[in-house]
Amino acid sequence: MSMFEPNKEFIGKLQSCISEKNDHGTLQLLEGLHAADIAELYNELDVEEAKYLYLLLEGEKAADALMELDEDDREELLESVPSEIIARHFVDNMDTDDAVELIRELDEDEQEEVLSHIEDVEQAGDIVDLLKYDVDTAGGIMGTEMIIVNEEWSMPECLKEMRNQAEEMENIYHIYVVDEDNKLKGIFPLKKMITSPSVSRVKHVMVKDPISVKVDTPIDEVSHVFERYDLVAIPVIDSIGRLVGQITVDDVMDEMIEQSERDYQLASGISQDVESSDNVLVQTSARLPWLVIGMIGGLSNSVILGKFESFFATNPKMALFIPLIGGTGGNVGIQSSAIVVQGLANKTLNISKIWVQVIKEAAVALINASMISLLVFLYNWFMFGTNTVTYSVSISLFAVVMFASIFGTLVPLTLERFKIDPAIATGPFITITNDIIGMLIYMGVSSLLS
Amino acid sequence: MSMFEPNKEFIGKLQSCISEKNDHGTLQLLEGLHAADIAELYNELDVEEAKYLYLLLEGEKAADALMELDEDDREELLESVPSEIIARHFVDNMDTDDAVELIRELDEDEQEEVLSHIEDVEQAGDIVDLLKYDVDTAGGIMGTEMIIVNEEWSMPECLKEMRNQAEEMENIYHIYVVDEDNKLKGIFPLKKMITSPSVSRVKHVMVKDPISVKVDTPIDEVSHVFERYDLVAIPVIDSIGRLVGQITVDDVMDEMIEQSERDYQLASGISQDVESSDNVLVQTSARLPWLVIGMIGGLSNSVILGKFESFFATNPKMALFIPLIGGTGGNVGIQSSAIVVQGLANKTLNISKIWVQVIKEAAVALINASMISLLVFLYNWFMFGTNTVTYSVSISLFAVVMFASIFGTLVPLTLERFKIDPAIATGPFITITNDIIGMLIYMGVSSLLS
């Protein structure tokens, strides 16, 4: 089976089944579709059609499909659904990590109402506990559904218990082994079930001292651990080593994709999570802020250049090189900051080595600055001879490249040190700042030389 | 166990063990370390030390650690290692997907030599077959190590065979079920081993018609399938449905990270894969090309502005707004192209809906253009009154925002249509182009109005 792509005919049939309230026909059309495929249909339906569909679906599929939706779509769909139905039809059929994600998206009053309607008291308790963890930490994305066995158990005991626990689970990645205090002692790979089924005790076949994360480990570090050790699931322990949850690779993948999309958008001057499918107003409100900041930057430049207005009257050639100097500063600054932001994200750059990076960056800048200002000097010399503009343009370019490189390196490093996401320092911020500094340098050098 | 971070003391001990050729001490230090941790040590050692270490390690660990290195580091390490040792010490201990990755990195003569030294003829045959697939397709990253059972087998037969096959495998994600022609019929989830061990035939418990990809499915589509269906492994089939390989989530994760880093770098004007840890020359050569293109753009602008040099002499105020107009065009263009590039990457934007996107973009642009040019008009009116510059700046800004938005949307969509990576259209390319067009519009409008 390959990936499901809904065609117009399918959508048409589905819509007519829905409009006729043909429950049987609707369910028949959706039969065999994965929850993620059902979620894909959301954009093709209006909210009322989608609501009918999600409430008609059998609980587990409905819950899965709901969690495959984008956050905005999910909010829209649930807007007029009563808390009791959210709890009984959706949350009751979810793993705790999904339930926590969903409940976090509701407003406070609704959170309590939904929690009070959850049927399984134990699950409700787990969810309340999970809600306490910070959303950016391992605790905030972990689930509590795991198969757990005791290290002292014999294999038949263990198998029996595994059978009991496994019934309720969709996927099994690992079987976790704990001691009588619930402290994590090992992992029992499913492979061992095949290769050594007749060993006496769990603790003799388990893999001891497995890689784990703490509840308060930040999510980006969790992703990094998955990536380094090629994991599919990781146990989460509390401060005294007790097993409290599990994070699976699909959740980490979602986090990684969201993070890289966020970084990319920040670098492109788009200030909130926005998709090409969003409407015109959402798009505008995501983009206008940086454009206005850019506009203020541009107007500031007009003030700076205004102080030297008489220069342009007497030597109008100076105006011709404004775009070159501003543009070069912007390009250099973005390169430098991107190298730092990426290095910090993939942990190849260590914040303790800040000066090593700055010195290296200065060396790169020195070569680039020399090359660019030499080439421009040769061009201007050929075109205009050795007048003031020829000199001041090349000297300014040299200074701008040096400054923009070091500035582009220092700003994200400084933000990181103050625990602010360094990615906000890329893109328009660096371009606009370097544009202004470029003009200051150009005007400064020109007034010194004239 | 949490993530391993080597400290100075550890590195010191390791280096002294290596310099004393103390095999036993070296191995003792590395005992218990994951292959990925050993790979982390590479940057702390010189090449000769690292080579000693990798050749000393037991084959499987050495092979795993080698494949955890960056491509450049791996190349450096293997540079003076004879083909026979590459084959016997490393490739013989690898899964076929890793072996193919390694062999692809060697030059042609060395490829053949290494292949001829592989001990297991069947593995060598698999590798030669895998090398035929395009590196950007499912076939190019799949491995052939899988547990395969026949749909007609009884459970005891199946278990016996599984035990045989599982011995050689590091991880087991799924057990694949085929018919007598080796056509993929289903997946046998390991969970079933626990929950229904006594069923008569494999085909009665398998999950039928599992999601699969074809050997020629492009990698970005493979990632998308993993992401949509939250998979940990996917079977790969040939054109007539025979099972030929398996792709696992860790390989897909690596691909996704590389792709997002590549896009980010392209958007930042860095032209080849470069890390903050690379040396000054590598960094310079990755960055200078875009800076030179930017310089040519800037000089082109000076030529355009040069045609209007007399304008600046008579009306020097015009020069003050050059950075505003160029900068705004650049900012708008990057936003528009980023929305398209991201939409294409995460498949929320369909190329068949190109005109929908362009019209939506035009609507967003209309609002942004009106806002920005109105604000600037009010500012200039207040500062300078209603002279020619006040009018021409605002009219130009309006035109530049409209143009840059539509251009920023159309360029990546056009590239995508011609199967060129749309990400190259972001960043400096868009900024430089829009800067030039901005100047043309500004000068054009100004000469019409004066």
Image (cartoon, coloured by chain):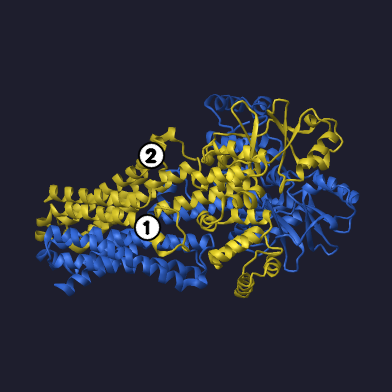
Chain colours: A yellow, B blue
As drawn, the label of residue A285 is 1
Relative to B55, is B79 above or below? below
Q: Judging from the image, what secondary structure is the residue with disc 1 in?
A: helix
Mark yes or no: residue B47 visible.
no
Residue B242, placed above or below residue A371: below
Residue B95 lies left or right of residue B221; in this view the side is right
Three-letter residue code for mark 2: Leu
Point out residue A432 in the picture as x, y percentages from the top left corner: 29, 52
Residue in view at x 63 percent, y 71 percent? A14
Which of the 4 image quadrants contains residue A357?
Answer: top left
User: Does B361 sit left or right of A244 as displayed?
Assistant: left
Instruction: Report the mark closest to the observer, 2 or 1.
Output: 1
Q: Secondary structure at mark 2?
A: helix
Q: Quadrant of the N terminus of chain A?
A: bottom right
> Do the CB atoms of the residues marked 2 and 1 lie less than 8 Å apart?
no
Counting from the top left corner in percent of width and height, residue A351 is at 43, 35
x, y percent for residue A251:
60, 47
Judge by depth and name the residue closer to the eye, B376 or A320: B376
The residue wearing badge 2 is: A415
Q: Mark 1 belongs to which amino acid? A: Ser
Q: Are marks 2 and 1 on the same chain?
A: yes
Residue plotted at (41% across, 51% down):
A266
Name the side, left or right, on which B140 lies relative to B187: left
